[in-house]
Image (cartoon, helix red, strand yellow):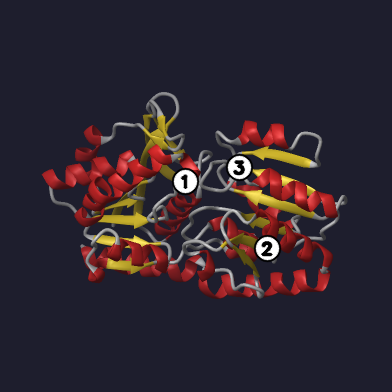
Amino acid sequence: MNILHIPPYAPPIEGGSERFCFNLCKKLISLGHSARVLSSIKNSTRFTVIEGVPSFFRRNYWQMLGLNPLSFIYQDLRQGVDWADIVHVHSYIYFLGNQVALYRRKRRFPFILHLHGGTSPITSDVYGPSAAVVKKIYDATVGKWVIQTADIILTSSRDDATNAINRFGANPDRVIPIPNSIYVDDFYSAPQNPLIVTFMARLTQLKGCYLIPDIIKRVYQERKDVQFWIVGEGHVESFMRKELEGLPVKFWGMIPQSQVPDIFAKSSVSFLPSYTESCPLAILESLASSVPVVASNVGGVPEIITDGETGFLTQVEDTKTMAEKIIFLLDNDDTRVSMGRRGRKFVVKHHSWSETVLKIEKIYEAMI
């Protein structure tokens, strides 16, 4: 089979949806299929091969809300659709996916839309009242249209599946939850000295990055022996650097996927104070490294963190409780280690690629 994947970005600029996309492409290629990527890039249009995946990029002229790439791929879709047996788009909220849905109205082809989060409303205190209104209008119009245009809706969590049906009117028979997956064998645990608390995600409002300085300051007030690692890049970074100046915080920036296992292996606890999530790969990667996670109780997060068993769940914006849970894990070695072990067992059983790629392959075959 020939499968054309359309994520918003590609490595080294990536989040969970992009990493899932490229890992899936690599698995499909290893099974004898052909997979290509069409996406956006900061500078000029170009073709390259990333991690063995042929990838074509159109220039990104602007990032709407600091996240959504303004790249024009409509002219490339004719050639892409001529080649592909399946067009697999990653996320409904990006301009690239809008163009695929528009072309789908012009010409029929097997169209899979993969929801990687973002299906819940955003409150005005995240991006401001204007952005919240725009998101509400978008979801009720363009977003709903894109979702209903697709032949099949794959979701990274049961929460996204519920939203697709209840908020966007998707046909329940066409909505299929597919758990995010990782290469579990790439992840390992290592001696944790000194103790390190890690945050890994895009540095944006939705990931709760404006809350992170308060969380870190609360933890540092109780544990002066702890170091903090911030992994990722985004427009909130300058604010975070200013607020955390003088504290033992290391900003890693954007790192290649090959370095992610080493980061988590050396971590003691990870945290994610997001406002909205689906099935974050950073949580799966942390658990696969036997590192418990403290995260906001949003979206699909409670589907992968069992509160008190593999980590802790806190309410959105409750920086005090999140800091307290991090401190508790740092203070209680036996609990931290046992939680980490349970977390790895969970990921091995439910989120490894060996099963996931076969499920997606069967969906492709049924569509063709």
Which SS class for mark 3?
loop
The structure residue drawn at horizontal position 40% and vertical position 24%, both measured from the top left corner, is 44
Which SS class for mark 2?
loop
**Residue 176 visible in rendering:** yes
Q: Earlier in the sequence, mark 3 or mark 1?
A: 1
Q: Which residue is mark 1?
A: 52
Question: Percent from the top left, x then y, of residue 131?
Answer: 39, 39
The structure residue drawn at horizontal position 29% and vertical position 65%, both measured from the top left corner, is 166
Q: Residues within 10 Å of mark 1 (few under 14, many from 20)?
A: few
Determine which of the numbered discs, if any, sits on residue 289 in the image: 2
**Residue 110 visible in rendering:** no
Contact? badges 2 and 3 (CB < 8 Å)? no
**What whole-number distance in Å separates the C-alpha atoms at marks 2 and 3?**
27 Å
Which SS class for mark 1?
loop
Q: Tell me which amino acid carries mark 1.
A: Gly
Question: Percent from the top left, x then y, of residue 263?
Answer: 70, 51
**What whole-number distance in Å separates the C-alpha atoms at marks 3 and 1?**
37 Å
Front residue of 327/154: it is: 327
Q: Earlier in the sequence, mark 2 or mark 1?
A: 1
Q: How many marks?
A: 3
364 with respect to 125 (left or right): left
Q: Which residue is mark 3?
A: 210
Q: Quadrant of the C terminus?
A: bottom left
257 with respect to 109 (left or right): right
In the rendered view, tell whether residue 223 sits above or below residue 11. below
Q: Tell me which amino acid carries mark 3.
A: Tyr
Can you tell which of label 3 and label 1 is closer to the viewer?
3
Front residue of 9/36: it is: 9
Determine which of the numbered discs, if any, sits on residue 103 in the image: none
State which quadrant residue 7 falls in. Answer: top left
